[in-house]
């Protein structure tokens, strides 16, 4: 396995890494590896256009119309 050294990281970033690692129950080093994996090896998001085109053509436009309601009075 290769090693990676990252220098000159802001204190806030290091603290955020430690907090995130703690919340996931792992070391900062393990969390750093997981962040790199997620960022670099994740599958690309589905193409939104393709997903929309694959949706069935059902209903009429008015079925999906937004119903405008009058504003509610807020109790103080």
Image: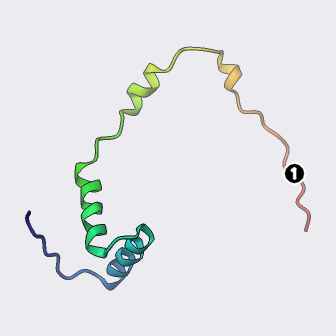
Q: How many marks?
A: 1
Q: Residues within 10 Å of mark 1 (few under 14, many from 20)?
A: few
* Location of residue 59 by image quarter: top right
Image quarter of the C terminus: bottom right
Q: Position of residue 17 (x, y in %)?
A: 35, 74
Query: At x 88% / y 60%, what residue is drawn?
Result: 74
* Colour mode of the rendering: rainbow
Image quarter of the N terminus: bottom left
Secondary element at image label 1 = loop
Query: At x 46% / y 26%, what residue is drawn?
Result: 52
Image-based side of 40 in relation to 67, left or right: left
Given the current orientation, which residue lies at the most extreme front position? 25
Query: Label 1, on which residue?
Result: 72
Q: Position of residue 42 (x, y in %)?
A: 28, 47
Query: At x 24% / y 64%, what residue is drawn?
Result: 33
Q: Position of residue 35 (x, y in %)?
A: 29, 62
Q: Nearer the viewer, residue 60 or 46?
A: 46
* Location of residue 9 by image quarter: bottom left
Rendered view: 60 above or below 3:
above
Image-based side of 9 in relation to 58, left or right: left
Image-based side of 20 in relation to 28, left or right: right
Q: Position of residue 73 (x, y in %)?
A: 90, 55
Q: Nearer the viewer, residue 5 or 24?
A: 24
Given the current orientation, which residue lies at the most extreme bottom position? 11
Q: Nearer the viewer, residue 22 or 61?
A: 22
Rendered view: 53 above or below 6:
above
Image-based side of 24 in relation to 31, left or right: right
């Amino acid at each position: 396995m290769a090693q990676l050294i990252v220098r000159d990281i802001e204190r806030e970033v290091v603290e955020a890494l430690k907090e995130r690692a703690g919340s996931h129950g792992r070391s900062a080093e393990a969390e750093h590896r997981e962040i790199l994996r997620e960022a670099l090896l994740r599958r690309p998001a589905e193409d939104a256009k393709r997903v929309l085109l694959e949706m069935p053509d059902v209903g009429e436009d008015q079925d999906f119309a937004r119903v405008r309601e009058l504003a509610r009075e807020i109790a103080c």
